Amino acid sequence: MPEKNLIDMELYAIIGKQIKNARNLKGISLDTLSELINGEKTKSTLKRYEDGSSRIEMDMLEKICNQIGLNYVDVINNAKDELNKSGLVEIPIVYNDYFPLHYSTNLSAGTLEELLDSEPDAIVYVPIKYQMIKKKLHAFKVNGTSMNNIIADNSIVVAEDVQSALNLKDGQIVVAWVNGLATVKRLYVNGNQITLMPDSSDKSHQPIMINTDIDTVSIIGRVIWHMNPDDIEKYY
């Protein structure tokens, strides 16, 4: 049986070949691709991804694929199919760079304390780069379309604890607790005025305006990662 390291190298080489072919078809240089992903990876790193000499994290694969017209799930599955045809053993690549995190499917607990203390009833796999802050993370399933330009209905969001809303930049996506309900929105703070702004194709969703001298709002955390329902259905 081939060693796991050999399988990894073969798998990432196949993924890298798909990326390179699609990038060349689009006429996109490595320098341009680096710019399209906001400089998160350099030209040399992208080249190592393409030649299979470096492992590519799943969230980065998704970002790259989005810029070159590929679906990252298809890229993974194509690579696994080719790997199987070569006689090497299939490995669960989707979870190689992920760790399990429990999440709650119900955001309508009676109090904030009940929500945060509720027994999680499902598991999502979160990119390994967040494992060091696992104790600060909360995960929930989103119900509703108020953020569907960014986060689709029935997505899973992962939020990191924050000490204060003042530590957040305007426009960051947060999970907030307002009047007995949890909601996912963009946050804007202006003195004692907090605005929770939807980001939706459905214009019936209106901003939630809160005067903190009168009402209380708790920021459960800032959203740092989410999984779309299509991927949830495919892998869970």
Image (cartoon, helix red, strand yellow):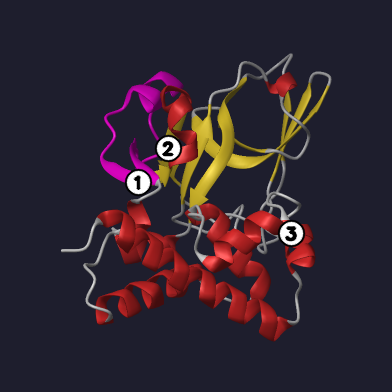
- SS assignment at label 1: strand
104 is within the stretch colored magenta:
yes
Q: Which residue is at a point 75% across and 40% down the rendered structure image?
A: 171
Q: Quadrant of residue 112?
A: top left
Residue type at tag 2: Ala
Which quadrant is the C terminus positioned in?
Answer: bottom left
Residue ID for mark 1: 124
Instruction: Sort mark 3 into few (<14), some (14-19) or many (20+) by Cα contacts within 10 Å.
Output: some
Quadrant into which the N terminus falls? bottom left
Q: Is residue 70 above or below residue 184?
A: below
How far apart marks 3 and 2 lie (CA) works out to: 30 Å
Q: Is residue 51 left or right of residue 68?
A: left
Q: Position of residue 38 (x, y in %)?
A: 76, 53
The residue most toward the bottom is 25
Is residue 144 found inside the magenta-colored segment of the image? Answer: no
Indicate which label's residue lies in the foreground, 3 or 2: 3
Q: Is residue 81 above or below residue 39?
A: below
User: If you read the primary sequence from the N terminus, does the residue marked by circle 3 or circle 2 appear first?
Assistant: 3
Q: Which residue is mark 3?
A: 34
Q: Nearer the viewer, mark 2 or mark 1?
A: 1
Magenta extent:
98-124
Total residue callouts:
3
Q: Is residue 65 or residue 218 the one in the foreground?
A: 65
Residue position marked by numbered label 2 in the rendering: 139
